[in-house]
Amino acid sequence: MSDLPRRAVTRSAKLAALPLGFAGRTALGIGKRIGGKSAEIVAQEIQQRTAEQIFKVLGELKGGAMKFGQALSIFEAALPPEISGPYRATLTKLQDAAPPLPAPVVHKVLTEQLGDDWRENFLEFDDAPSAAASIGQVHKAVWHDGRAVAVKIQYPGAGKALLSDFNQLARVGKLFGALLPGLDVRAVLSELRERVVEELDYLGEAEAQHAFAQEFRDDPDFFVPDVIAANEQILVTEWMSGTALSRIITDGVIEERDRAGLLLVRFLFCSPARVGMLHADPHPGNFRMMEDGRLGVLDFGAVNRLPDGYPLMFGRLTRIFNQGDMEAVVEGLRAEGFIRPHIEVDVDALRAFLAPYVEPTQVEEFSFSREWLQRQAAAVADLRPSNVVRQLNLPPSYVLIHRVHAAGVGVLCQLGTTARFRDEVIRWVPGFADDDDAEGSALTG
C-alpha cells in the first residue's frame, strides 16, 4: 500500500475527475434520449454510473474525501433500491475501512511522538493495523503492564489533507446532489469542515472518552474503552473486541439487529443526561456488538457538549407534534430560530419533513426499514426554492443534534430494527412525557 494517493496534486486530480466524468455521462444520456430511451431510464443509468465513480474515488482517498464518504454512506438506506443495491457493499466498506499506512511510516510517527525508545512502552506491537479510517489508524498492542490496548495513530498532515479535500468536494457538490436529491451537500461539507479541529485534537478526544468510560464502567448495556495514554497524535486505550455494526447490518440475524438498534438509540439518548455529552459521529464503524450483548462504542473525536442534557424544546415539540397541533409546532420552531420571522412554511411539507424523526415516538413499537426511509426521502426530495428543507434554518446549537438524529435514522434503517424506541424517549428526553415535563422538569431515568 505504499502508492497511496497522498500528494496534494494527485488528490486534487482524482477529485477533479469527478465532474468531468459526470458531464460525459450526462451528454451520453442526452444522446440516449434522442435515440428513444425514456428520461427515467436514462436518469437511472446516469445515477448508477455517477455512484460508481464517486465511491471508487472516495474509497481511494483518506482525509476529507473518506470522511465525506462515511457521511454519505449513512444515508445509503434512503437511496432507491436500483441505486443502493449495487453499491451497498462499497458504502459499507467506506464506513470502517481505508488503505493503511505502511509500517515504516507508522514507526516514524511513533518515533516522532514517543521518542526513539517508543517500543519500551509495549510488550508487543502489531505493525498491521486492525482498522484504518479517515483521520488515523488503529494498531493492536500489549501495553508494558500486560494489558491489551488499541493504539490510534493520526495520519501525518491529516488536518491539511482534510481541509484541502473539503474545498475540492465543495466545488463538485452538485454532483452528489444527483446521487442523493434533497440532501444539502454544502451543509454536510460545512459541518464536517467545522469539526476538523475537534477531531484532530486527540487530547480533547481522550478527555471525552475517559468521561464516557467512567460513567459506563460496569454498565449492563454499554462498554467504552478507557484511555491509558494520549498526546496530540497518539491515543492509547483499552482494547475492545466485538462485531462491527456494519457487519451486523450485512450479516446479523433479526434478534441481533433489533438489539443493536435499540442499544444505539438508548446510548444516544441517555448520554446527555448521564455524561453531559452526545456522541456526534454515529456511523456503524464506531460501534461493536460484544459477545456479552453490550454495545461497545469507539471514536469520541466529535462530541456535542450538553451539560444540561437534551434541550427541553426537543421533547416538548415532539410531544406537541404527536398531539397534532402543528400551529404550536411552527410557533415553537420560530421561537428556537428554526423558522426565521419572515418565512412562511407549508405546514403539510413541514409535517412530512419532521415525520422520520417523530413517527417512531408515536407507537409502542416501531420498525425501521429502507423502504420506510425511501418513502420519507421521496416526500421531501423537492428541489424547488420553496421546498421546506431550504426554508428552515438550523441554529448552531442544534447542528450536531440534527446530524446525530439524521445519521441515527439512517443506521436504524440499514439495520431494519424493530424495538420499543418510544420507551427510550420517555425515559431520557425531557419534555416528551407529559405537560409537567414541558414546564421545565427533566426526566433522569
Image (cartoon, rainbow, N blue to C red):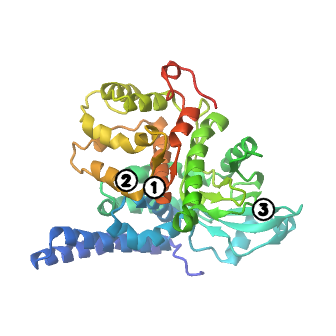
Which residue is labeled 2 in the image? 372
For the C terminus, which image quadrant? Answer: top right
The label number, if any, that marks residue 413 in the structure image: 1
Amino acid type of the residue tagged 1 in the rendering: Cys
Label 2 – label 3 distance at C-alpha: 40 Å
**Which callout, 2 or 3, points to the residue nearer the camera?**
2
In front here: 36 or 11?
Answer: 36
How crowded pointer 1 is (Cα within 10 Å; few <14, some 14-19, many 20+) is rated as many
Q: Secondary structure at mark 2?
A: helix
x, y (%) of residue 188?
A: 42, 52
- Whether residue 252 is situated above or below residue 430 in the rendered picture: below
The label number, if any, that marks residue 13 in the structure image: none
Q: Is residue 198 visible?
A: no
For the N terminus, which image quadrant? Answer: bottom right
Quadrant hosting residue 304: top right
Contact flag, marks 1 and 2 (Cβ < 8 Å): yes
In front here: 289 or 52?
Answer: 289
Q: Is residue 90 visible?
A: yes
Q: Is residue 292 left or right of residue 52?
A: right
- Whether residue 376 is situated above or below residue 41 in the rendered picture: above
Residue that lies at the very extreme toward the right in this rendered image: 145
Residue name at image x 38 percent, y 53 percent: 373
Amino acid type of the residue tagged 2 in the rendering: Trp
**Which callout, 3 or 1, points to the residue nearer the camera?**
1
x, y (%) of residue 318?
A: 43, 32
Residue name at image x 73 percent, y 63 percent: 151
Which residue is labeled 3 in the image? 149
How crowded pointer 3 is (Cα within 10 Å; few <14, some 14-19, many 20+) is rated as many
Label 3 – label 1 distance at C-alpha: 33 Å
